[in-house]
Image: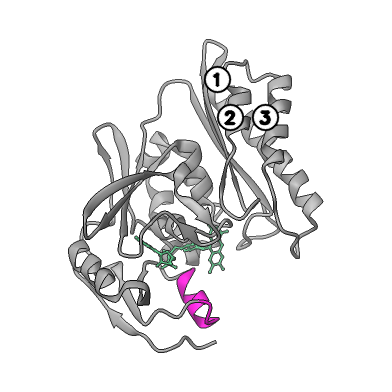
Amino acid sequence: MIPANFEYHRPGSVDEAVSLLTEHGEDGRVLAGGHSLIPMMKLRLAEPAHLIDLNGVEGLRSIAEVEGAIHIGAMTTQAEIIASDDLAARCPILREAAELIADPQVRACGTIGGNVANGDPGNDMPAVMMALDASFVLRGPGGERSLAAREFYEGPFETARDDDEILTALRIPARGAGQGQAYCKLKRKVGDYAIAAAAVVLTMDGGTCSQAAVALTNLGITPLYAEAASAALTGTAVDAAAIEAAVEAAVAITDPAADLHGPVVYRRRMAGVMTRRAIETARARATGG
Ligand SMILES: Cc1cc2nc3c(=O)[nH]c(=O)nc-3n(C[C@H](O)[C@H](O)[C@H](O)COP(=O)(O)OP(=O)(O)OC[C@H]3O[C@@H](n4cnc5c(N)ncnc54)[C@H](O)[C@@H]3O)c2cc1C
């Protein structure tokens, strides 16, 4: 339960952090809130020789509006997401999901950037970001690039981020009129990861759904964007038949592992329950119902 030896670095700027990552390559690892990485290091599932702590880096902890989009610095903690009334008014699913993560102690240190960069299919924010059609801003030695959340996850703890890149911010498109959002998560008790969870963002326009996005947590080897389920809602009144079709399409892409909480058949069944609940809640919120 004691991590392997490592050298600790505390850069003061993103550029300095990127050069340290570039210098140490696969041996370097960024430290944010430490609530996923440190447990992995204690279990010796991660043994970075160089730990590059982002907590001294200026400018990564912010919530702002940039060119109409919500811009959240990667080092913003989950507790800060919850505490921001302005953010909750602009994008309520963020507070709803953050409140379901772990416990207050973890949320006080755990960052939104660490949550999405980690690549654990059990993390809650990746599915939320997929449903919101967010993008992630990455800075590496060659400059900055932006990647869609829906394209970011490649395998368990594997993402499209290069080893020498730092996630600096998340960009979330502004919420348009008639948009409803919901995150529904089933867990046994406070501190548990999801048995199954679903994020839904949909827009109702004159009784018809003009845009819908459904994404799932902890139901496969990566967070899952449920494209067919999203399409099954778009252009409909989000009535019983459309919801049934969307739930069926969402469950069809799940491939959870059996765990202490139950067998595969139970977790897939719960995927359907959470998806249905999130769609119904998002629709009600979109129509003020
Ligand atoms: C008891 C417990 C219960 C938990 N329950 C949940 C839960 O229900 N839902 C949930 O979503 N999470 C849960 N977590 C995890 C928690 O939310 C973590 O805080 C989060 O997964 C990682 O954020 P962090 O800031 O702690 O990142 P760290 O642990 O510091 O880093 C995680 C990984 O991301 C990389 N990384 C971090 N920041 C960046 C960056 N800016 N750029 C590039 N790479 C980066 C690190 O190198 C590391 O590989 C739980 C944790 C604990 C200890």
Which secondary structure, mark 1? loop
Are the residues flagged by discs 2 and 3 in contact, CB closer than 8 Å? yes
Residue at 55% across, 60% down: 156
Q: Is residue 242 magenta?
A: no
- Relative to 247, does residue 242 appear above or below in the rendering? above
Q: Which residue is mark 3?
A: 246
Depth check: give the residue in front, 283 or 190: 283
Mark 2 or mark 3: whose residue is earlier in sequence: 2
Q: What is the basis of the colouring in this image?
A: one colour
Depth check: give the residue in front, 240 or 161: 161
Mark 1 or mark 2: whose residue is earlier in sequence: 2
Residue at 38% across, 57% down: 161
Q: Which residue is mark 2?
A: 230
Residue 140, image x and y in percent?
Answer: 25, 58
Distance of label 2 from label 3 (alpha carbons)? 7 Å
Q: Amino acid at mark 1?
A: Thr
Distance of label 1 from label 3 (alpha carbons)? 19 Å
Are the residues flagged by discs 1 and 3 in contact, CB closer than 8 Å? no
Residue 214: which quarter of the image? top right
Residue at 33% across, 59% down: 75
Mark 1 or mark 3: whose residue is earlier in sequence: 3
Please give the label number shown on residue 287.
1
Which residue reaches farthest top? 206
Q: Amino acid at mark 3?
A: Ala
- Indicate if the residue with disc 3 has its beta carbon within 8 Å of ligand 1: no
Q: Is residue 126 left or right of residue 14?
A: right
| Number of other residues with Cα within 10 Å of mark 2, as a class: few under 14, some 14 to 19, many 20 or more | many
Which secondary structure, mark 2? helix
| Number of other residues with Cα within 10 Å of mark 3, as a class: few under 14, some 14 to 19, many 20 or more | many
